[in-house]
Image: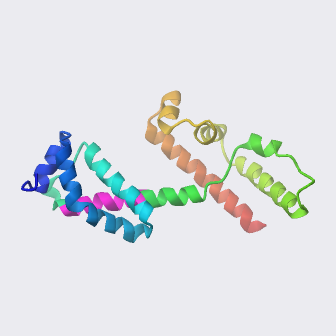
Amino acid sequence: MKNKTDLELMQLVMIKHRPALEELYDRYVKLVYSFAMKSTKDEQQARIIVQSVFTRLWTTRTGYDPSKGEYINWLITVTRNITIDYIRKQRRDQTAVTMDPEIWEVIPDRTENNPEDVVSQKLIREQVKRSYQYLSKSQVELIQCFYWEGYSLREIAQMRDEPVGTVKSRLHQTLKILRNHLVHEKEET
């Protein structure tokens, strides 16, 4: 395998020839890892990105096209795209807000809490309730299905008989609306 070109190896990877992927891994793991490490500054996250990049190479249907440039440039582009997606996902996960209206309605007002906790809890409950007014019934149901009932985007798309991309786009827009209203609420208080 060592005497094969990157193109030849990728062609073998496309037909699921594992030693070809292993050779590409040996050749480029340091490059992919260093790119991911510079972007995330976290060893564990960089390892996750490396795994994602080589998984993508194994599962891609289009693969590398030599007419569009050098293999190494293509690989760095794949790495960059996966890294950006990973970082964006991390940011979204860090800013996630609990949105289940039924949970907020049944949270008891505990008298054993100090007054500051009680007031804070009530304010959060009110902010979330007010934010839900900006959503349609369909948007609230989408959040319920995805976040609280554990359905995947694919499963929701099948239930609604819609393309996955449409459901994903609606979820993104719904979360954007909620985030904007919750941030606006926090700024006013």
50 sits to left or right of 7: right
Which part of the image, by quadrant, shows the C terminus?
Answer: bottom right
Q: Is residue 86 visible?
A: yes
Q: Residue at x 74, y 43 (%)?
A: 101
User: Dividing the picture into quarters, in which one does residue 118 lie?
Assistant: bottom right
Any magenta on residue 74?
Answer: yes
Spot the residue most to the left. Answer: 3
User: Dividing the picture into quarters, in which one does residue 49 lie?
Assistant: bottom left
Up/down of 13 relative to 187, above or below: above
Q: Observer-nearest residue: 115 or 4?
A: 4
Query: What secondary structure is the magenta-colored segment mainly?
Result: helix
Q: Observer-nearest residue: 73 or 34?
A: 34
Q: Residue at x 82, y 60 (%)?
A: 120
Relative image position of residue 10 (x, y in whole percent): 17, 49
User: Dividing the picture into quarters, in which one does residue 79 lie?
Assistant: bottom left
Up/down of 51 relative to 13, above or below: below
21 sits to left or right of 7: right
Q: Is residue 64 visible?
A: no
In this picture, which residue range is highlighted in magenta?
A: 72-85
Q: Residue at x 76, y 51 (%)?
A: 130
